[in-house]
Each structure stands twice: as C-alpha cells, then as structure tokens.
C-alpha cells in the first residue's frame, strides 16, 4: 500500500507502457505530481500532465524515471540531457545490461543530475509501486529515500551504476532458465497426454522450494552427475520420440557431462595420492 508522498516533488515518467502506467497510477494515488511523455501519443495517464515533448516532461520534474525498454534506454537518456540539471535524480528502471547502465550514467554526468540504476525484481503491472527494487549508483540512497516511504521495497546495494542491473540478470539465469525448462516439460507432457499431471508435479516442486532444496539440487547434481547424465540422455531420447526438441535438456546434459568428468578427475587424483 502506498503512503503519502513527500511534498514538493514532481516525478517524470519517460514511458507509459504497462510498467510506467502502473507506477504512474500509484504515484498519483499517493499524491505525487506526475509529468509524463511517451512516443505513442495515444498513451495517456489520468491525473498526470502528459507533455508534448520529452524535454517538457523532464524540465518540469525533480525526479525522472526512464521506464521504457532496454533498446530505448540510451536514446531516452541522450534526449533528456539538454533538459536535465543539477539537483535532479535520473533513474533508469529498464531491464538492461550493466555496461549499458554505466554508459547511460556517463552520458548524464555532464548535466549534474544524479544517476540511479534501478532493477525491478518482480512483475510491475500487478504490483505498481509495491514492486521490489534493487538500486545502485550515486543516486541510490536518494531514490530509496523517496520511493521507500511510498511503499516500494527498495534495497540499496552499492554506489556503482550497473551493480543492480547485474544482479537482476544473474537471477534471470535461473528465472528465465526455469521458465524454459517448464515450457519444454509441459510441451512434452502435452505430447504424452499427461500435461495436467505434469503441471501438478511442477507446481508441487515450486511450492516446496526453499534454500535447502536448492542446496540439495546443487549438491546432488555434483555428487551424482554420472547417474543423472544417463537419466537426462534417456529424457532426450523420450522427447525426440514425442517430437519435442530437447533444447533445455541438451544444456542439462552438457552440464552434467562436465560435472561427471570433473568428479572422475578428482577421484582419480585422490587415489593417486594414496600412499
């Protein structure tokens, strides 16, 4: 739930898509004055001053939130430069690589505005200002002090631009990999006419997930790599029989093969050291 806004601040939203619109509505509900701009003029936000140009929206604000896409993030920052000034906070909330966040910080540096690299860690449309956020960069503390009291769970993780972005992408290795594995498994379940059962099995495993389970998964794969390798080779054969391409399965096989070789090498070295 959003709290009452700090007085006297105007927040600029560069982007009124699902994420920008959701955060914008919550800001307005909390009493924050909002200016906004979107290249799609059909996008509007009730209660915000939607400017005709990006420059107008930025010039009218104290805090700028770039919340469009990674592909447009640098272009938006470059377009904002002529209107930015010392004392403003510019936060990039896009899902972008760390090097791009650092590049944006460098582009903005001559303006005197303070930069924050903000990584949104959950789906924004459903949560709005309640979306958990990691933030780094020179403006991280300022970002947290404004948005934290409004109900955003903000964690400051460092002073370097790109640190927040890197952590989000590291988590994406698992999150997006898990989604790909679920997609491959459910496709195979559909082909085998047992997808309802399989979806229940997957949901049950996710519901029981905790750090202890993660430790068991990691340790089990390392200790039983050879056995699991053979199992996943059988999985690959089954998927091909079902005419489902085993893309994620193939990656798992490659990892398990490497682990099995490493473990065999470690055992051989230990035996050679026995006197």
Image: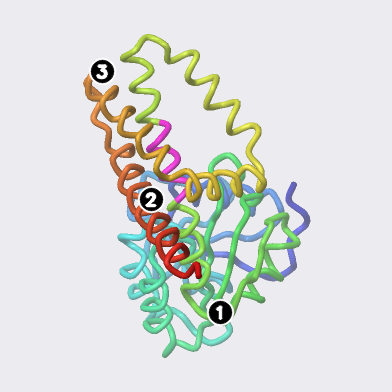
Would you call the spot at circle 1 few (<14 residues within 10 Å), some (14-19), or many (20 or more)?
Answer: some
Residue at horizontal 34 percent and vertical 21 percent from the top: 188
* Residue that numbered label 3 is attached to: 242
Q: Secondary structure at mark 1?
A: loop
Q: Earlier in the sequence, mark 2 or mark 3?
A: 3
**In the image, which is nearer the foreground, mark 2 or mark 3?**
2
Can you say whether 175 is above or below 36 in the image?
above
* Residue 88, numbered label: 1
The image shows residue 168 at horizontal and vertical percentages of: 50, 59
Q: Which residues are magenta?
A: 174-182
Q: Quadrant of residue 107?
A: bottom left
Residue at horizontal 73 percent and vertical 61 percent from the top: 5
* Residue that numbered label 2 is attached to: 260
Q: Secondary structure at mark 2?
A: helix
Q: CA distance from mark 2 to mark 3?
A: 28 Å
Q: Is residue 267 visible?
A: yes
Can you say whether 29 is above or below 181 in the image?
below
The image shows residue 226 at horizontal and vertical percentages of: 39, 43
Q: Is residue 124 visible?
A: no
Can you say whether 48 is above or below 98 in the image?
above
Please, what is the dominant secondary structure of the magenta stretch? helix
Residue placed furthest toward the top: 193
Residue at horizontal 39 percent and vertical 27 percent from the top: 185
Q: Earlier in the sequence, mark 2 or mark 1?
A: 1
Do the numbered discs 2 and 3 sit on residues whose CB atoms are within 8 Å?
A: no
């Amino acid at each position: 739930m959003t709290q009452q806004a700090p007085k006297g601040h105007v927040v600029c939203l560069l982007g009124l898509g699902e994420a920008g619109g959701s955060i914008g509505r919550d800001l307005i509900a909390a009493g924050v004055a909002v200016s906004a701009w979107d290249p799609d003029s059909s996008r509007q936000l009730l209660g915000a001053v939607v400017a005709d140009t990006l420059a107008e929206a930025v010039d009218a604000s104290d805090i700028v939130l770039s919340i469009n896409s990674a592909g447009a993030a640098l272009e938006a920052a470059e377009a904002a430069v002529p209107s930015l000034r010392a004392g403003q906070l510019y936060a990039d909330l896009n899902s972008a690589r760390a090097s791009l966040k650092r590049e944006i910080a460098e582009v903005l540096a001559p303006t005197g505005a303070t930069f924050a690299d903000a990584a949104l860690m959950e789906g924004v449309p459903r949560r709005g200002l309640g979306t958990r956020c990691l933030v780094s960069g020179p403006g991280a503390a300022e970002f947290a002090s404004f948005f934290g009291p409004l109900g955003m769970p903000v964690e400051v993780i460092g002073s370097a631009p790109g640190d927040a972005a890197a952590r989000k992408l590291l988590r994406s290795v698992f999150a997006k990999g898990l989604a790909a594995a679920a997609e491959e498994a459910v496709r195979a379940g559909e082909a085998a006419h047992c997808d309802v059962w399989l979806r229940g099995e997957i949901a049950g495993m996710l519901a029981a997930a905790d750090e202890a389970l993660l430790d068991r998964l990691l340790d089990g794969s390392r200790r039983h790599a050879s056995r699991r390798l053979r199992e996943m080779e059988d999985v690959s054969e089954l998927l091909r029989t079902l005419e489902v391409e085993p893309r994620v399965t193939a990656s798992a096989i490659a990892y398990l093969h490497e682990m099995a070789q490493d473990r065999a090498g470690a055992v051989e070295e230990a035996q050679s050291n026995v006197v």
